[in-house]
Amino acid sequence: MALPTEGQNKNIAWDSFAAEIDIEIEQTEKELNEISILLEQSEGEVEKLAERNATINLHLQKILTQIDDLPSAETKIAYNAALDSQQRLVVMRSQLEKLKSEQKHLNRYFKIVLKVKQAIDEGAMDGSDNSSSQGKFAAAEMMIQAQEAERQRLSQKIHDGPAQTLSNFILQTEIALRLFEIDQSKAKEELGELKASASNTFQQVRDFIFDLRPMMLDDLGLVPTVKRYVEAYREKSAIAINLSVTGQDRRIESYLEVMIFRAMQELINYCSNQGQADQLNIQFDMGLDNARLNMEDNGKGYEENAHPEESTIGIKMIKERADMIGGSFEIESFEEGGTQFTLNVPI
């Protein structure tokens, strides 16, 4: 959704904003209807695959009871058919869960947009000052978009990471169980892969929990958490990060610790992904009255019409939050490449 811009007539800008809310409601309703149709189709497909899978499994069980009397080729065909059926079922169930997750998030977003629409209508009826309301709804819209972008990111991360791996984990378990009755050495090999998969999934879940809300932040504070996060990011990415921490390591207000940490997370991801940097210098100073985060990368910088604050919701929110608490957030791009971010937070 486009925000009302400065310089336009206030009433026209407000009417334009209200009209875009109406368009957003209509578009969201359309997307919800499309997802409902896809869900119905997918549920039917999953049901058919589940029935087919059950039939094939029964056939396989009969073959296993006669395994000594049947040629190995026939056993292999039955086994491969069962494996293929299970794989199809796992994939379809995974797609179904993803659709349900998208529907849930879209419903939540739809309710929020309807509340914005209701507030606009009530403001128009009671004659509220549009110019002051305009700024409030611009901030509200930014918050909505940021929250939904974060929910979508987390949902996709769960689906592509632990959820997908666990689906494969279940399939590998079934394979190992069947192999024990056919080829025990092959079954042991499969169990070894299963163990490695379980270990990898466990680490993914730990990383995911850390990204959601590092317990270290509550227990030890900002500086140790920043150091741990940078260390972990170095290990899992190609970007070389140099971290320098100065000042007095001490606890500050919890909401400030969260704000600074989330800003650092967002900026590291921006430099690594959109900025395509392979080197990043981070300086964090905890002064007496001010915390200062300075980050400079060697990435591609940005074009004049693609300022990070204009193109990335997360970076917009850093600026918005800094302004709300009397801080500042500045971005500078260099002709030779690279971008510098500076966040100042009064503490």
Image (tube, rainbow, N blue to C red):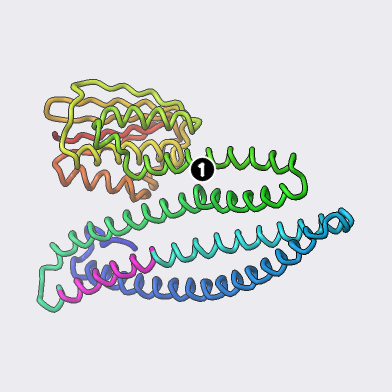
Is 233 left, or right, of 80 in this rendering?
Answer: left
In the rendered image, the vertical position of residue 185 relative to residue 112, given as above or below: above
Q: Which residues are magenta?
A: 105-122
Is 136 left, or right, of 314 in this rendering?
Answer: left
Identify the residue shown where x is 44% and y is 62%.
Answer: 101
Q: Position of residue 223 (x, y in %)?
A: 26, 28
Identify the residue shown where x is 29% and y is 59%.
Answer: 144
Q: Nearer the viewer, residue 180 or 172?
A: 180
Q: Is residue 190 magenta?
A: no
Classify 10 Å Cα crowding around label 1: few (below 14), some (14-19), many (20 and above): some
Which image quadrant is residue 196 in?
top right
Q: Which quarter of the rendered picture does the C terminus lie within?
A: top left
Which image quadrant is residue 4 in?
bottom left
Which SS does the magenta portion mostly show?
helix
In the picture of the structure, the residue carrying the numbered disc 1 is 201
Q: Which quarter of the rendered picture does the N terminus lie within?
A: bottom left
Q: Which residue extends farthest bottom?
A: 125
Identify the residue shown where x is 61% and y is 72%.
Answer: 45
**Residue type of the residue flagged with mark 1:** Thr
Give SS at disc 1: helix
In the rendered image, the vertical position of residue 202 relative to residue 232, given as above or below: below
Q: Nearer the viewer, residue 105 or 312?
A: 105
Which image quadrant is residue 302 in?
top left
Is 21 left, or right, of 206 in this rendering?
Answer: left
Q: Position of residue 261 (x, y in %)?
A: 28, 37
Q: Position of residue 233 (x, y in %)?
A: 43, 32
Identify the residue shown where x is 50% and y is 48%.
Answer: 162
Q: Position of residue 67 (x, y in %)?
A: 82, 56
Is 279 left, or right, of 343 in this rendering?
Answer: right
